[in-house]
């Protein structure tokens, strides 16, 4: 079994400065732990790739892509209402997140690797026309559109265990019955973006293809394990052709901006179960995306636990 991990300076550059929760040091912390554990020698190490403009337009509006490009040149202003600042080169950095995810998809679909992990990815808040919550381009959304347009896949599953609800992804596909979404997140009454209520199960023909599981503040590994079977039931009901897994580490205890209390065991468990289900439903096609996580030790532990589970 081959697992590809995508790392490099161009991917690490996606961040909003030293001291920012989403700083450019996040990938390096993860990769150092990979080396400390000897996991770097067990994976296929791949370089980042910058997406072409046409790829970004699979999900985002032309006006928004132009706006990011313009503010990238000046490095000034915000790309949303105050959470996501522009910086010089933000367009190239964000396009590299997207391009690296698409390169991982190509490698999986073409047989170069069995599954893959991209640590700086899973930017699930960006909408089709605006940045949000530290997310400039929504690589998850582009990935879904790319899988359908380039590989004619009929049903794609997106599973998200980040503490924050993946609102940009969810509402973009809320009425799409071929996108299966399971999102376990901190209850929106207590955490940004305030969405993802249990009653939101999809609209129209897509009703029942979406699962939101709001977790109470202080929910722990036992609570996560108790909630998890609903995810597997959804995937059994709608077997996917490909699984995207957003494994944000901000759902772990002691994250500075969230209130859940998982350990890396939850991330390991979810990754292991999804790997098994991918083998059962979709020829092992599983792509994990690092997502959030603002306690550096936590993200290193969570993401390496995901890698270990995918290798096991």
Image (cartoon, helix red, strand yellow):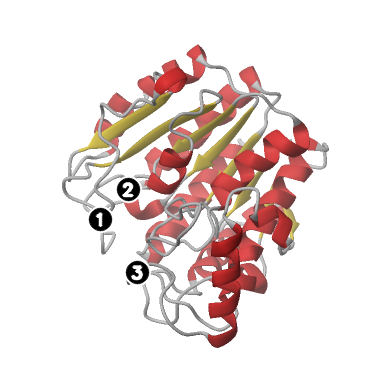
* Residue beneath disc 1: 258
- The front one of 76 and 289 is 76
Spatial distance from mark 1 to mark 2, Cα to Cα?
A: 7 Å
State the image coordinates of residue 218 (x, y, percent, origin top left). 18, 45
Quadrant housing the N terminus: top right
> Are the residues flagged by discs 1 and 2 in contact, CB closer than 8 Å?
yes
> Are the residues flagged by discs 3 and 2 in contact, CB closer than 8 Å?
no
State the image coordinates of residue 145 (x, y, percent, origin top left). 64, 40
Residue 23 in view, yes or no: yes
User: Which residue, as the protein is rendered here, is positioned at the far front?
Assistant: 63
Q: Is residue 311 left or right of residue 49?
A: left
Spatial distance from mark 3 to mark 1, Cα to Cα?
A: 16 Å
* Residue beneath disc 3: 83
Q: Is residue 295 above or below residue 280?
A: below
* Residue beneath disc 2: 163
Q: Name the front one of labels 3 and 1.
A: 3
């Amino acid at each position: 079994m081959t697992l590809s991990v995508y790392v490099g300076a161009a991917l690490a550059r996606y961040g909003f400065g030293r001291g920012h929760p989403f700083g450019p040091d996040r990938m390096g912390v993860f990769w150092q732990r990979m080396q400390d554990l000897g996991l770097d020698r067990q994976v296929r190490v791949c370089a980042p790739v910058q997406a072409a403009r046409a790829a970004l337009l699979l999900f985002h509006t032309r006006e928004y892509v132009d706006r990011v490009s313009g503010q990238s040149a000046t490095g000034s202003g915000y790309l949303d209402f105050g959470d996501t600042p522009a910086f010089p080169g933000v367009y190239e950095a964000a396009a590299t997140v997207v391009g690296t995810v698409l390169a991982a998809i190509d490698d999986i679909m073409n047989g170069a690797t069995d599954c893959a992990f991209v640590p700086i990815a899973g930017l699930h808040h960006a909408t089709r026309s605006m940045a949000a919550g530290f997310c400039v381009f929504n690589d998850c959304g582009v990935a879904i559109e790319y899988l359908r347009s380039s590989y004619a896949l009929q049903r794609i599953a997106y599973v998200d265990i980040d503490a924050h609800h993946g609102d940009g992804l969810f509402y973009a596909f809320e009425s799409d019955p071929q996108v299966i979404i399971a999102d376990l997140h901190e209850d929106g009454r207590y955490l940004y973006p305030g969405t993802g209520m249990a009653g939101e199960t999809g609209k129209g023909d897509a009703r029942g293809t979406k699962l939101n599981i709001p977790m109470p503040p202080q929910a722990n590994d036992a609570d996560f394990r108790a909630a998890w079977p609903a995810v597997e039931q959804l995937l059994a009901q709608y077997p996917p052709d490909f699984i995207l897994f957003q494994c944000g580490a901000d759902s772990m205890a002691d994250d500075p901006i969230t209130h859940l209390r998982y350990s890396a065991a939850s991330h390991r468990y979810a990754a292991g179960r999804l790997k098994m289900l991918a083998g059962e439903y979709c020829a092992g096609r599983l792509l994990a995306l690092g997502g959030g996580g603002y306690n550096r030790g936590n993200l290193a532990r969570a993401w390496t636990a995901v890698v270990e589970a995918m290798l096991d």
